[in-house]
Image (cartoon, rainbow, N blue to C red):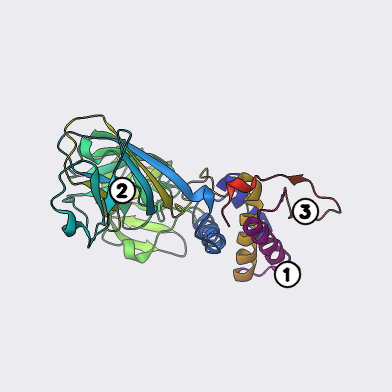
Amino acid sequence: MNLNQILARVLRAGRLPARVESHRRQQAKDIINEALHEILSYSNEWAFMYKTFECYSIADVQNYALPLTCESIVNAKYDGTGLELFYPGKASRYTHLTSPLSATLTHLTESPYSISGYVYPTWGLSEIVGVQTAFDSNVVGRFFKSEMDGEIYRVGEFTDANHIVLSQEYGGKHQAGRVKVIGSTDNEKKIVYGNVHTTNFAEWMIGKYIQIEGNGSTIFTIEAVDEDRQRLTIDAASNTGEDLIFSIQDNYEIDPPGAMILTILAAPPEDDKVISVDYYQSHPPLTSPFDVPLLPFNYHWVLVAAALEMWLTENPVEGVTPDFYRARKERGIAQLMGHEDALWDAMHQSAEPDTVRLDGSDIIG
């Protein structure tokens, strides 16, 4: 079950329309991520959270960014040979080692990249458009984080100094939906009409730039915001039109604080040697409607139950109680912890529910 299907269930249970794009979907997404965090907090030894990261060496380069979800390192290899790892605070005791078989792990406290310009990330698209940015090929494989969204994305492609492509769709806040622009003359300021279900225009956006694609990608300044009716006043005339994609000016970081860096004490002398790291990860946030939780597929219903419990607790619906879903969630977590069979869909009450065997080796209790 992917996030889109989970959201549909959550939205139906909350008596909300399933086909929404922005603030209601954002609320559901936040609740799903919160429910996922609660489930995973029951143990820090889930086998499905162990991953392997691989990258290729670059001659004379020592530092390699590991996935931001990396919590701890189990093993590391350089072109098939084990790396002896030294953690911060201990590295100074091994300064005499010059072999590529030694390495340190550090967490960044600030971004090592000098950031210029700003970006226009658009919900549902993977391309990031920059203005006065200075992207280069070195950002590929690095982490991208926008200020308004706060989620972490990996950069998949470099296009040019003002364009990069993320490895997944941008699912950020305040960037969803489409708009229409109307006005009577080219000389008057125009009104940008959003939708109470699909946009998140707020007063803090006053003074920010807005880019309206389909309007020649023209950039305007937001002068006023009507939050109740979801309307913006922009500072100059714009072509009119409907179903136009918009995005809001945003600050960003590359390799933001918190990224874990593997430093090989003697830099690899050649290109394209495999660096392989086995690690235990924290669960990345679900950002796109098609992100899939790392929970074993047979246990996705536990996440659905936990999300529905949270949803109904925060959004009471007459005649619907969260207790039913709370009981299912707790039962599912107990099964996960005890290596038991997974009920295929414990949300449906039946006398003889189907069962699917989950191999005990998939879970470490």
Callout 3 touching callout 2 (CB < 8 Å): no
In the image shown, does 311 or 247 lie closer to the viewer?
311
Q: Amino acid at mark 3?
A: His
Q: Residues within 10 Å of mark 3 (few under 14, many from 20)?
A: few
Q: Which residues are magenta?
A: 315-341
Please state the horizontal and vertical placement of residue 258, each as a whole percent of the image: 30, 58
Q: Residues within 10 Å of mark 1 (few under 14, many from 20)?
A: few
Q: Residue at x 17, y 59 (%)?
A: 93
Residue marked by disc 2:
144
Please state the horizontal and vertical placement of residue 120, each as a whole percent of the image: 30, 47
Position above or below: 12 against 135: below
Q: Residue at x 65, y 53 (%)?
A: 339
Residue marked by disc 1:
318
Q: Earlier in the sequence, mark 2 or mark 1?
A: 2
Left/right placement of residue 340 relative to residue 268 reads right
Residue marked by disc 3:
348
Q: Amino acid at mark 2?
A: Phe
For the residues labelled 1 and 3, the Cα–Cα distance comes to 20 Å
For the residues labelled 2 and 1, the Cα–Cα distance comes to 42 Å
Please state the horizontal and vertical placement of residue 158, each as a whole percent of the image: 26, 35
